[in-house]
Image (cartoon, rainbow, N blue to C red):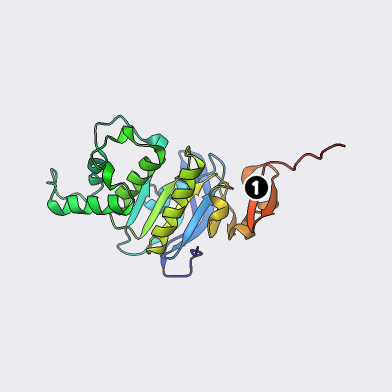
Amino acid sequence: MTGTGVGPELIRLTGVNAAYGHHTVIQDVSFHVHEDQFTGIVGPSGSGKTTLLRILLGTMRQSTGAVVRQQGLKVAYVPQLETINWNFPVTVAECVLMARPQRGLFPRTTPQDRRDVARVLDRLGIAELGERHIRDLSGGQQQRMFLARALLRDPQILLLDEPTSGVDITTRHDMLHLLAELHEDGIAIVLTTHDLNGMAAHLPHLVCLNHRVVGEGTPAEVLTPDVLEVTFGARMEVLEHLGMRVIIDEAPQQRTA
């Protein structure tokens, strides 16, 4: 899996600070996103991960610092599933269709719109679910539906907030594999996660965040006891298993004879 970011730059953050009222959430963050990048932003709850995504998306302005985007950049966002009202009376196809660019106050659905929706649903393997109500989907299907909404915009960069939160191991693996395919198709991907073993250890590029950037690089470079302790506020052990990093919260207890 590639994605360490050596291609043309899409977004550049330099010395960015952001706050809600008088509460500063991220401090002096410098971060670049390139078109060939696949990055995980890792950190505990409240560390500023979602705020950083909102700044990348452009829905939140920084307090100080600079944010520079490639002209005409197309960005799409996949929110946390926990934030969605799943009882809203809409089918999968209708929900995806809502993501199309607005054309007037009361836009009419065209045959091309329907073909575009069918195309992205098929691309994500959920073509048969188009007429199903969104509340009747599994967690993995819900996540694929929101990916379809994002892909309808033909984005250059895809931002995902905790895409594997609350899903089982199989769904998590499928999501990681699907995101890798989308990245290979030419979409830059930035996601947030607190899942160190299931998600972060498998990504090519990581940013450890705790209000500021604590570490940045490959998993081998940043998933270290020292960086993780500053990031999560607790000492963690890092083991090697089959060439992968495995993180545990504390050292294994010694067995007694």
Q: Is residue 68 above or below residue 227?
A: below
Q: Quadrant of residue 72?
A: bottom left
Q: Is residue 196 left or right of residue 125?
A: right
Which quarter of the rendered picture does the C terminus lie within? top right
Q: Position of residue 125 (x, y in %)?
A: 33, 50
Residue tagged by mark 1?
Answer: 247
Percent of width and height locating residue 168: 49, 39
Q: Nearer the viewer, residue 219 or 235?
A: 219
Viewer-closest of 253 and 15 = 253
Residue at point 41%, 38% (across, down): 139
Q: Is residue 160 visible?
A: yes
- In the rendered view, does 248 fall on the left or right side of 175? right
Residue 62 at least partly seen = no
Specify whether 186 is left or right of 133. right
Q: Residue furthest right?
A: 257
Task: Give the farthest residue toward the top.
Answer: 87
Amino acid beneath label 1: Ile
Q: Secondary structure at mark 1?
A: strand
Residue drawn at (69%, 45%) of the image: 236
